[in-house]
Image (tube, rainbow, N blue to C red):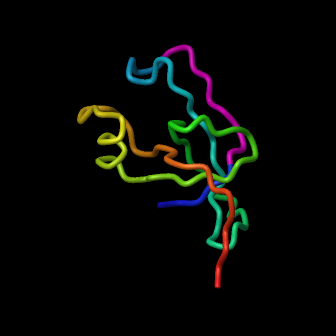
Amino acid sequence: MILGKVCGTIHSTINHEFYNNKRLLILDRLTPEGVPTGHYLIAIDSVSAGAGETVLVLDEGNGARQIVGDSMAPLRSIIVGIVDDINVQ
């Protein structure tokens, strides 16, 4: 699992049919303390996350495909939760 902060969206006119009617968000990866790393990734939004929200991302293709219920989906990363608070001891 990866922590990320939503910083943008992806729009495309030509794409694989799997991506029709799905939101693609750009995420800035975060450290466990919530500090941006400057490394980005793109993930499908399954929780209606908004700009600036901290999210939990599953970045493993097989698990992501299981969530969408399509074993052949061209998918690697999916947002699975919105983070309310981070507490590192």
Residue found farthest to the front: 84
**The C terminus, quarter of image:** bottom right
Where residue 4 appears, as percent x and y from the top left, is 62, 55
Residue lying at 38% horizontally and 23% vertically, measured from the top left:
18
Q: Quadrant of residue 16?
A: top left
Using the image as rendered, state which of residue 33 and residue 19 is in the foreground: 33
Give left or right: position of 88 versus 75: right
Residue lying at 57% horizontally and 20% vertically, measured from the top left:
12
Give left or right: position of 65 versus 88: left
Residue found farthest to the right: 52
Residue found farthest to the left: 71
Residue lying at 64% horizontally and 39% vertically, measured from the top left:
49
| Above/below status of 64 relative to 1 | above
Q: Quadrant of residue 77?
A: top left
Q: Which residues are magenta?
A: 6-14
Where residue 29 appears, as percent x and y from the top left, is 62, 58
Using the image as rendered, state which of residue 54 and residue 13 is in the foreground: 54
The number of numbered badges drawn on the structure is 0
Residue found farthest to the top: 13
Where residue 82 appears, as percent x and y from the top left, is 61, 49
- Asked if residue 42 lies in the magenta stretch, the reply is no
Residue lying at 67% horizontally and 53% vertically, measured from the top left:
54
Where residue 86 appears, as percent x and y from the top left, is 67, 68
Q: Quadrant of residue 31?
A: bottom right
